[in-house]
Amino acid sequence: MESSRQTGHRPEVHRVAVIGTGLIGTSIALALRSHGVDVLLSDPDPASLRLACDRGAGRPLDREPQGRPADVAVIAAPPAVVPAVLREAQDRGLAHVYTDAASVKASVAAEAERLGCDMATFVPGHPMGGREKQGPGAARADLFLGRSWALCPTGKADAASTALVAEIARLCGADPLVVDAAAHDRAVALVSHAPHVASSAVAARLLAGDETALSLAGQGVRDVTRVAGGDPALWTEILAHNAAPVADVLHAVAADLAAAAEALRGAAAGDGGRDPSALEPVRDLLSRGRGGHGRIPGKHGTVRRPDYTVIPVVIPDEPGALGRLFAAAADAGVNIEDVRIEHTPGLPLGVAELYVLPGAVDILALALSDGGWSVHPGA
């Protein structure tokens, strides 16, 4: 791979072909373009390809004269079609190394091998980033910033190929993580696929809600159901390719919900008042849920620190407001560890909850107050 020279321990990436200009493919392309990488784009949908090109994600692959292969070809397509697309790309000699972005790995790798793909140049991958919106119009160059990017080499790919795909991940702002394909599929069943089904189950209940109920919907139900806005056809395919691990998680979730529902039925019948332990399954589930939530990594993949202090700041709902708030914190020399935005329905303002270290609370609160911000520490 003479076109991918090593600089220290990191290979250089000059040219990448991205096959598939949906949300993921276009986001990868935009991130690579921001680093000056030459990106060639391909998609069976001319409208999708045109929009990705118009957004500056690259130029059409089919208009490129047959020349030197790309350093890497990224196949950003649904899992069912990745193996066939890979075989075709390899037959064309499109790149030196190939990877994909499908969210399941074991079945994709097995089918690719069955089709006779060159597994020595294929490093299966999965960037752990996404949105409920689809298509190149929803793509963002920072979609993978700070996210994990799973690499699942089959054992036939050499270290140089894996390193090259890892560099693609780093250029997109992600943290590459080498993991076994089967372990990856079990992991995403737990942290991605089953949660999507659970989110959809809650959202489906809203179809039976009357206007009064829906008018009372707040941020909580929006948070829980956000990913339910994904494409049903795509997600059905994803779930089918990871069926057994997802089913295992859903059975466990269903058992927890059934136990909680039974306890609540008992409480409604009067048992809860006479026997406080009757609601123990509910308390246990809520307690374990809080503990599990606390294990979700924060920024840079680190475990969330329990000692952050939240400073609520009222912000106007207008362009640039959040940027000005962050700039004010930077001027005060305070690092914002995390942030959440709570919108106020019907009003042109919201509340930014700034997570900072306890020692920075007074410094930041004073600086923001002096700057005219409405700060409510301790609220």
Image (cartoon, grey):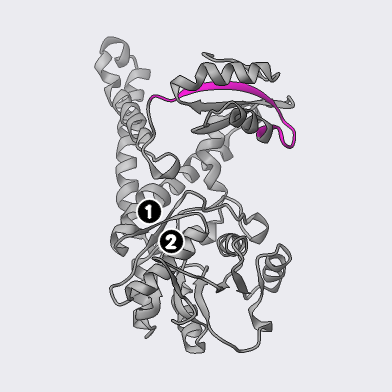
Residue located at (34% from left, 59% from top): 185
The residue where tag 1 is placed is 188
**Mark seen at residue 126:** 2
Image quarter for residue 24? bottom right
Could you tell me residue 269's position as x and y percent?
Answer: 35, 18
Could you tell me residue 350's position as x and y percent?
Answer: 66, 26
Residue located at (29% from left, 58% from top): 183
Going by the picture, which residue comes out furthest to the front? 8
**Which class describes the residues within 10 Å of circle 1: few (<14), some (14-19), or many (20+)?**
some
**Mark seen at residue 245:** none
Horizontal arrangement in the rendering, residue 214 relative to residue 174 (left or right): right
Using the rendered image of the protein, determine whether residue 312 is visible from the camera's viewpoint: yes
Horizontal arrangement in the rendering, residue 272 relative to residue 315 (left or right): left
Range drawn in magenta: 307-322
Residue located at (31% from left, 72% from top): 154
| Nearer-the-camera pick, 139 or 70 | 70
Horizontal arrangement in the rendering, residue 190 relative to residue 11 (left or right): left
**Which class describes the residues within 10 Å of circle 2: few (<14), some (14-19), or many (20+)?**
many
